[in-house]
Image (spheres, rainbow, N blue to C red):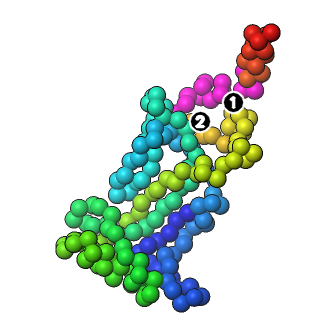
Amino acid sequence: MAKDFTRWTQGEDGFFEPTTLRMEANETTPVYAWYNRTVANTPTFIGPKGSRGDRQSRIYPFKLYEGKAYFDRKTGTLLSMDFAPPMATGNTLAGVASAAKTLGIKEYDPVPGWQTIYFGSSHLVTKEKALSCANCHAPNGALNFKSLGYTDEEIRKLTSAALYFDKMAEKQKEDW
């Protein structure tokens, strides 16, 4: 999903809202990333910290959200916005000015910029809707193992049905 908070459009109800540039987040395919339950929070990225080498990290599904908002040219920080002025008039800079006044920020230089935000998307997953092993561990499965840091050889092993069946057969022999 992508929204432009620097340009608002008037709806049928007479109120203004941020311009939607792309489909809703719930209509998109999840992106999988390593996550160690800590979050990076920079002006251009809010999302999971973690890596394949971090023993605390696990692979989690996320929905990507991109937003265009105002940053302070002087500090590089994201500026807050009071939504009341832009909702009523469409004037986004009035919303930034209102928030700056409330927060006691006297000097700022607003410039538009993009920010990527990762939203966890496991909150609607039920046992019945959860992915099975085969959904991910198959060629062209849900996981992009390459982007998660796996080598071609590791990917071959992770997506090989024969290896899984062999492991299952070995485990069944051990259980007998």
- Left or right? Give the position of 170 relative to 17: right
Depth order, front residue of 140/50: 50
Q: Give the residue type at disc 2.
A: Phe
* Res 166 visible: no
Identify the secondary structure beneath mark 2: loop
Residue occupying image coordinates x 38% and y 48%: 40
Q: Give the residue type at disc 1.
A: Thr
Q: Name the outermost residue toward the left.
A: 106
Q: Is residue 126 magenta?
A: no
* Res 159 label: 1
Q: CA distance from mark 1 to mark 2?
A: 9 Å
Q: Quadrant of residue 63?
A: bottom right
Q: Is residue 154 magenta?
A: yes
Tags 1 and 2 touching, CB below 8 Å:
yes
Start and end of the magenta stretch?
A: 149-163
Residue occupying image coordinates x 61% and y 66%: 23
* Res 145 label: 2
Q: Is residue 78 above or below residue 40?
A: below
